Amino acid sequence: MNPLRDPQDRRLPRIPEPCALVIFGVTGDLARKKLLPGIYDLANRGLLPPGFVVLGFARRDWTDGDFEALAHDSAKDYARTPWREEVWARLAGNIKFVGGSFDDDAAFDRLSTCLDDLRHSHGIHGNAAFYFSIPPSAFPQVLKQLARTGMADNERCGGWRRVVVEKPFGYDLPSAKALNDLVDDVFTRDDVFRIDHYLGKETVQNIMALRFANNLFEPLWNSKYVDSAQITMAEDVGIGTRAGFYDATGAARDVVQNHLLQLLALVTMEEPTSFDAAEIRAEKLKVLRAISLPTDVAAGTVRGQYLRGWVAGQRAVGYLEEPNVPEDSTTETYVAIRLGIQNRRWAGVPFYLRAGKRLPRRVTEVAVMFKTAPHLPFNRTDVEMLSSNQLVIRVQPDEGVVLKFGAKVPGTTMEVRDIAMDFQYGEAFTEASPEAYERLVLDVLIGDRTLFPDAAEVEQSWRVIDPLEEAWQGVRPESYRAGEWGPRAADEMLAREGRSWRRA
Ligand code: BG6
């Protein structure tokens, strides 16, 4: 061990041991737009070990060079950091490809031999992570192949073997459990990394810093001072070419079960005893277990589906007109849900979650709305422009935190109006934020599981979503025009409780 290096000091660059990253599904969008560019960014920041190898596996008759060309173009088009040929040249020599389908035993035998060879040629000591960037229906077959060839066996391989599983992790609780069992049969528990890419976002990690590194917010963070909270994930895009996946999934399964419930957990959980993966997961799980659903699902939730309209000056087709969407589809592209949390801190505080496609703009934020002051010693007209205090965590874009409170308008009268105190990442720090996938791939290779939900969290989140899905069966979603903030029923849902959605 380096005597000058304090093992507790996490500010020092964390660099993985020499290893290989095997990507299944290299030709898909995720690999091309996120993983391969993320790997380049890590290399550019000097965070990859010298012996690092990227191994692509797909049903293509490709040479290493063909895959390297795809990786090069993907990285060049989508990398976050500036392009440097010399960085690519170093990576390019370590990009390999094995062609074959998932039922092709010989192809997996070749993959296994290739990893064995890399042990000596690149000094990877048997270390490899397998990234499943493939549809969940293909998981069982690939897992079976990894088990059959012994590729998942840490002992046989003389190093670590990890698996990275992309969401959606199951379709409901029974399928998630079946999938967890399947993965656990092949890999040891600590070697399974389930991706929820929201946890890789700097602004999402900052929720814990904001809450647990400061003394300012904690005394107010409870039902005595908080009136309600709104978690919004709005996207201006439609479903693109993903009809096959999306129509069978819908907004609640696609983003609420994972991203929004994870945000909710981070905002409402108790302080972990340390910043250790197991401690954080334990607190998140506890609060996920305390979630209560609306007693009347029809009154406490709204589902919507977009009609044709205009988004940011561009014409947009309706959901039912999107390519490959069945004309009678009842899949929701918008959902709003009112949840409660049954514990001492939060009883009685409503948490409104909403997510939708083809909304006016892309914005993800958590807004904590505080109760109004119990007494205002002003004339009514002086405070007409004053609303309640709000703390808004802007996840994206314009990453930062805004605190809204009242201040006196300069002049001879005592008029008080809302103003905003604004922290922006772009202004406060010189370092640009890494992409979520950049951070998460690095953590997989290092073996740091802090930002990965475990099986219990995933299953608990399905316990929240499943009863809602069941109640929605056969119910047609409300309509909203592309470019509107969802169906009118969502506004009515809050209006019934004397509240309104924040203009995100
Ligand atoms: C994915 C969903 O998990 O998140 C997509 O499957 C969605 O439907 C995407 O578009 C949004 O991610 P981000 O990071 O752009 O907010």
Image: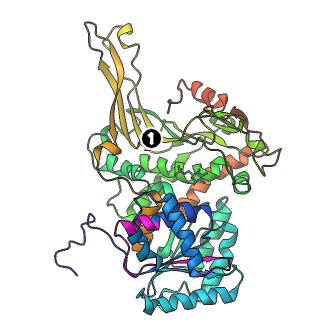
Which SS class for mark 1? loop
Residue 311 appears at what percent x and percent y? 62, 35
Observer-nearest of 173 and 91? 91
Q: What colour scheme was applied to this rendering of the protein?
A: rainbow
Q: Residue furthest front?
A: 85
- Which residue sits at x=61%, y=89%? 110
Q: Quadrant of the N terminus?
A: bottom left
Residue 195 seen anywhere in this rendered image of the structure: no
Residue 287 seen anywhere in this rendered image of the structure: yes
Query: Is 219 placed left or right of 26 in the picture?
Result: left
- Which residue sits at x=66%, y=52%? 466
Observer-nearest of 137 and 359? 359
Amino acid carrying label 1: it is Trp
Seen in the picture, residue 419 relative to 351 is either above or below; the reply is: above
> How many residues crowd around disc 1 within 10 Å: few (fewer than 14), some, or many (20 or more)?
many
Residue 161 appears at what percent x and percent y? 49, 81
Q: Which residues are magenta?
A: 39-63
- Which residue sits at x=37%, y=40%? 401
Whether disc 1's CB lies below 8 Å from ligand 1 is answered no
Seen in the picture, residue 352 relative to 6 is either above or below; the reply is: above
Residue 453 appears at what percent x and percent y? 49, 62
- Check residue 31 for magenta coloring: no
Task: Please tell me in which quadrant of the rendered image residue 335 appears.
Answer: top right
Residue 63 appears at what percent x and percent y? 60, 81
- Check residue 59 for magenta coloring: yes
Total numbered labels? 1
From the image, tell me which residue sits under label 1.
346
Seen in the picture, residue 98 relative to 301 is either above or below; the reply is: below
Observer-nearest of 434 and 420? 434
